[in-house]
Image (spheres, grey):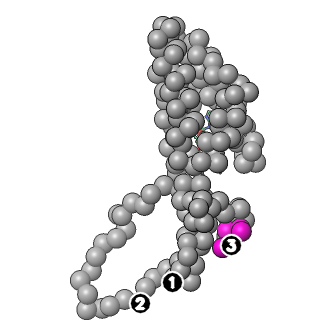
Amino acid sequence: MPEFGPTGRRIIYKDGKPCRSCNTLLDFQMAMPGKAARPAVIAADLTAPVTVVEDKQCPPDVELLGRSSWTLLHSIAASYPANPSPIQQEDIKTFVSIFSRIYPCWFCADDFQAYIKKNEVQVKSQEAFGKWMCEAHNEVNRKLGKKEFDCNLWQQRWKDGWKG
Ligand code: FAD
């Protein structure tokens, strides 16, 4: 079982198998038993009918899952009320709590839960929740060595569109 993948990242395993939603597709494919030596193009049978496979979509890797999930999370923040009722505040707290426990990349989920424990979800207003989500995203950006996002701009990115 290789420890690192072609991207240079450590490969995450669960129960001895590489975890698809915790690794990049490239690393996952390399770590799959029997897949490493698989040629990209399998020798063609020129008599076989042509099958179009380009449109086949694969399960998400850690990056596609992450990008799609942040889109959902920030969009939920963008549609959260400016003045939420007590029930709406409870709902959003419950949602974030459940999300952090069922997120398919389990080691991402563990860190997200730890973040929530240290930084209580802010649900008093859309502004507070949107900023909280932005800070939570920045925590992951820092962990991955990515650029931090300016949280004063989260509404332009996820709600109103860019000015000018
Ligand atoms: P993303 O980080 O997915 O961002 C998408 C878009 O959001 C960006 O293009 C930008 O326009 C905008 N954006 C960026 N930062 C912010 C911000 N702070 N606030 C608002 N908008 C912003 N991956 C791992 O490898 N390890 C992890 O431990 C890990 N933990 C994760 C935890 C959670 C809860 C989630 C949802 C994802 C996690 N990911 C993790 C995935 C990771 O955060 C990225 O989604 C993935 O690496 C793809 O990155 P990306 O460069 O496409 O942009």
Q: Secondary structure at mark 2?
A: loop
* Residue drawn at point x = 70 percent, y = 35 percent: 114
The residue at 50%/43% (across/down) is 68
Q: Is residue 98 visible?
A: yes
Residue at the (52%, 24%) spot, across then down:
94
User: As displayed, is residue 19 above or below residue 158?
Assistant: below
Alpha-carbon span between mark 3 and mark 2: 27 Å
Return the x and y of residue 107 as percentages of the image width and height: 64, 48
Q: Viewer-proximal residue, 88 or 154?
A: 88
The label shown at residue 2 is 3
Q: Observer-nearest residue: 96 or 15?
A: 15
Q: Secondary structure at mark 1?
A: loop
Identity of the residue drawn at 46% across and 11% down: 87
* Residue range highlighted in magenta: 1-5
> What x and y, as percent, mark residue 113?
65, 35
For the residue carrying disc 1, how many other residues have a C-alpha within 10 Å: few (<14), some (14-19), or many (20+)?
few
Q: Which residue is mark 1?
A: 39
Q: Which SS does the magenta portion mostly show?
A: loop
Q: Are marks 1 and 2 in contact (CB under 8 Å)?
A: yes
Q: Amino acid at mark 1?
A: Pro
Quarter-of-image position of residue 44? bottom left
Q: Hey, what amino acid is under mark 3?
A: Pro
Where does residue 123 sit, x and y in percent of width and height? 58, 16
Rendered position, 78 above or below 26: above
- In depth, the one of 6 and 21 nearer the eye is 21
User: Is 162 left, or right, of 117 in this rendering?
Assistant: left
Mark found first going from the N terminus, 3 or 2: 3
